[in-house]
Image: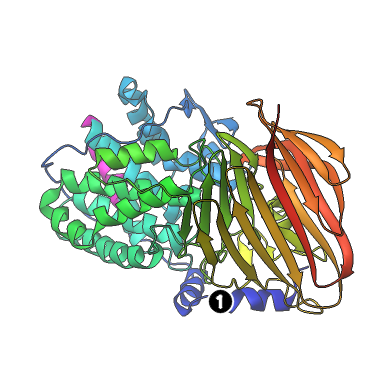
Amino acid sequence: MISLATYWRTIRHLRRQQILARLRRVVPQLSRVAGPLPPTRSLQASFGEFIRRTGPIRSGDCFRFLNQACHVTTRDDWNNRGPSKLWLYNLHYFEWLRETTAAERIAEDAAWLDRWIVDNPIGRGVGWDPYPISLRAVNWIVWFLTFGRGTESHFKSLAAQIRHLTRSIEYHLGGNHLLANATALVFAGAFFEGPEADRWRARGLELLDGQIREQILADGAHFELSAMYHSLVLEGMLDLLGLGHAYSDVLGAPLTAMGLKETTSQMAQWLGAIRHPDGQIPYFNDAAFGIAPSPADLLSYAKDRGVPVNRSVNHLTVLEPSGFAILSRPPFHVIFDCGRIGPDYLPAHAHADTLSFELSLGDNRLISNSGTSTYERGSERERERATSAHATVEIDGVSSAETWASFRVGRRPNVAPVQYGTDQRLDWVETWHDGFRYLPGSPTHRRRVTATTDQVCLADWIEGSGIHSIRGILPIHPGVTVEKLAESRFRLGLPSGQAVELVIDGPVGVTATTGMFAPAFGSTVSRPLIEWRLRGTLPISVETRFRICGP
């Protein structure tokens, strides 16, 4: 049972616009989608190459998303209650039109557009939710432009979907959904021409300009602070640059004026900085492989669009606006979450992972957070968002942020301004948060991360007063072996053959156990877990050291 206090701690952060938009959605509105078909606009240049999906996403009538395959053989299958809502959303995105094999099956894919139109009457089912409409509209238009295909019935349906979208813009959610809505309006407003298309394009550009200014932080990060969603937003921005090239007469000046190329350059540089040495994204907040294109594909796509992506390589990179620090002293590479969980009014994809870290040795991951396997409400979603699923500290068995339901956060931590320094020998970063301030004695967690070429050290101070139960979590990446050498000393063996000695100093008991890790949606695996515990009077301090050792 969720308490009224939790509801209040959640609702109090919402913006007035969000609340009013939610109230308007309570009252059903008629969707006016009828109207003459706007003519399509003549291309001025090619849309250009884009990121192809390797798939296979679709094979015949079998679709695979989120590591689950289902057949679509009847009209009801488009809204089947068996798969999750996110799975159904993916079905309606039509992302498989971007597969590498799409050129070989144009007629077959066109038939699936026809089938969607027949099986999904206007306004019925999840396919008419604004977010699937937005992604599907872009994917259809990219397909039309790439293969020169599309029939009058396809265009009529697209226009109806955009008319429906204009009446259901997701102001109640905001964030990446609102950017997707704006992008779809711009795409449709450029693909079609005439007064109605001009209104779509103008509204989309105005919304896009305002949301880019709000959602893209000064260091280039998307403000929801998930590298996965950052990647999805970046791909959308790069697609818009392609559209601006194809329709430079109506989009060239507006996109230049809003500085879209400069924004995508900052976003690409942030992505390049935040990735692990293995080239993939870290697992902070909602993150999983297989949803967004890889960083390598996105950086290559950015270069193809003429977007500068180079960032100087430093031992210490502190991304203060987004709250991440990267300490890179090869072979060690640390990514430290030293910022807030996300925007106060939109923490939907936030985890209680404040002051968590991920650690790689060369191209091998050593410490990694929980990952994300589901958005469905329940114990699995709660577990993956909890502090106990991340490489940080838990106090009295509660999380540093009050995550609940699937996308809600009540109480959330404040994080102090980060302090840091670097010299020829070492790098260090330090900050603290007050996510446990409501507990007796108002405990706070301070963490300092130090890196050299030989060692990574974490110093944790739990400050405040009173007697508390403290737990430090070290989630070991799957594939790493754990051998106990002494009471607080372990040998961690990596698949590469390298080994790291882990030593924990402090008045704690240390155990090696197992936990769960979600590398992708619909996928969880067992992995080693090392944790230290104590129950005692604050303040206390614990030091954790990772040192390279012999094979």
Check disc 1 and report its element: helix, strand or loop. loop
Q: Is residue 426 visible?
A: yes
Q: Position of residue 455 (x, y in %)?
A: 64, 45
Instruction: Tell me which residue sits at (24%, 42%) in the image.
Output: 305
- Where is residue 258? Give x, y as percent: 23, 62
Examine the structure image and report whether residue 151 is included in the region drawn in magenta: yes
Q: Residue at x 50, y 41 (%)?
A: 291
Q: Which residues are magenta?
A: 147-159
Q: Quadrant of residue 453?
A: top right
Q: Is residue 431 left or right of residue 89?
A: right
Colouring: rainbow
What residue sits right under mark 1 in the picture? 13
Residue located at (62% from left, 64% from top) = 408
Q: Point out the image quarter for the C terminus.
A: top right
Q: Is residue 301 above or below residue 343?
A: above
Q: Quadrant of residue 416?
A: bottom right
Query: Viewer-proximal residue, 332 or 389?
Result: 332
**199, 46: nearer the viewer:** 46
As for residue 283 lying within the magenta part, the answer is no
Q: Residue 398 at x, y = what percent?
A: 77, 65
Could you tell whether 376 is left or right of 32 in the image? right
- Image quadrant in which the N terminus is located: bottom right
Query: Which amino acid, mark 1?
Result: His
Secondary structure mostly taken by the magenta-highlighted segment of the chain: helix
Please tell me how crowded label 1 is: few (under 14), some (14-19), or many (20+) other residues with Cα within 10 Å: some
In the image, 317 versus 425, the foreground residue is 425
Figure check: 232 above or below 339: above
Residue 451 percent across, percent down from the top left: 59, 50
